[in-house]
Amino acid sequence: MKKGFFITLEGIEGAGKSTMVNFVENSLIKAGHDVVKTREPGGTKIGEQIREILLNNENNKLTSDTELLLIFAARSQHMKEIIMPALSSGKTILCDRFTDASYAYQGGGRGIDASRINLLEKWVQSDFRPNLTLLFDLDVSVGMERTKKRSKADRFEQEKSIFFEKVRTCYLKRAEDEADRFRIINSELPLQKVKDEIAAVLKEIK
Ligand code: Z5A
């Protein structure tokens, strides 16, 4: 069993991360991992306060640069307070979104140049990257249809399908460029089949 392992979950909205995160956690625990489950933006008291600003759909004046900087401010706190200490003590971190989301949403979706995101990534993380990233992938229209049932859309969920198409394209390109780290999960499949795909991937790290 690998010690000090860092796993991230990514995907466009409606991809089913929230639905599957407990399954991933329980599978890891069963395999003997000491798991810390966390999320971004958020994961710390300060990060969760930043998350509220980011998701609040009344904040329609928030610029793309401010959004990106807030996300990396929250990430810096998360790295120092939670991620690095837990990894040093041999725990497995399961993080719902991480820096791939910044490239996909702020880069692909908002159009911020990847070189700027890379600058912040180097500042906050140095060369630290996830060991494994599960990308929950599905057609944008299927994802949007699934999230229609939510009572109130947050600031990101208010975006139109063209935004999520760009986010998805960016995720898939990153998965192609870093095929060793990424595993694509077909989240259009029925729930049990999605679980089977996840279980097959997790076997690799036992
Ligand atoms: N963000 C960013 O912009 N930049 C960054 O660097 C970071 C984040 C780190 C909040 O993320 C926002 O932060 C996010 C990007 C931004 N905004 N968006 N969009 P979040 O991860 O907290 O929130 P989320 O994207 O809305 O995802 P979620 O709540 O974690 O869940 P989900 O992946 O969208 O899906 P779900 O809630 O699990 O499932 C949706 C519905 O589909 C639900 O009714 C399920 O029962 C159903 N479902 C799920 N799987 C299936 C299958 N297989 N079949 C049928 N139905 C299914």
Image (tube, rainbow, N blue to C red):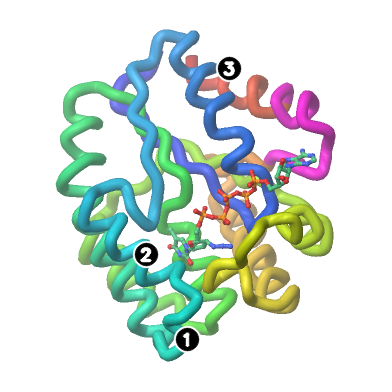
Q: Quadrant of the N terminus?
A: top left
Mark toward the viewer: 1 or 3? 1
Crowding around mark 1 (Cα neighbors within 10 Å: few <14, some 14 to 19, many 20+) is few
Q: Which residue is mark 1?
A: 60
Please report the residue visible at 73 percent of the width from the left and 78 percent of the height from the top.
Answer: 162
Helix, strand or loop under label 1: loop
The kind of residue tagged 1 is Asn
Secondary structure beneath disc 2? helix
CA–CA distance in space, label 2 to label 3 = 36 Å
Relative to residue 4, is residue 203 depicted above or below?
A: above
- Disc 3: which residue: 203
Residue found at x 38% / y 33%: 37
Report x, y in % for residue 150: 67, 56
The disc, 2 or 3, on the residue closer to the chain's N-terminal end is 2
Q: Give yes or no for residue 192 being in the magenta stretch.
A: yes
Residue 204 is situated, as x and y percent measured from the top left of the image, at: 56, 21
Q: Is mark 1 within 8 Å of ligand 1?
A: no
Q: What amino acid type is highlighted by mark number 2?
A: Glu
Of pointers 1 and 2, the one earlier in the residue sequence: 2
**Does 2 sit above or below residue 154?**
above
Q: Is 131 included in the stretch rendered in magenta? A: no
Q: Earlier in the sequence, mark 1 or mark 3?
A: 1
Q: Identify the image quadrant of residue 182.
A: top right
- Three-letter code, disc 3: Lys
**Is 187 left, or right, of 89 in this rendering?**
right
In this picture, which residue range is highlighted in magenta? Answer: 185-196
On residue 52, which mark appears? 2
Could you tell me if the residues under marks 1 and 3 are in contact, i.e. CB atoms within 8 Å? Answer: no
Residue 65 position, x and y percent, is 37, 84
Mark 3 element type: helix
Is disc 2 in contact with disc 3, using a CB cutoff of under 8 Å? no
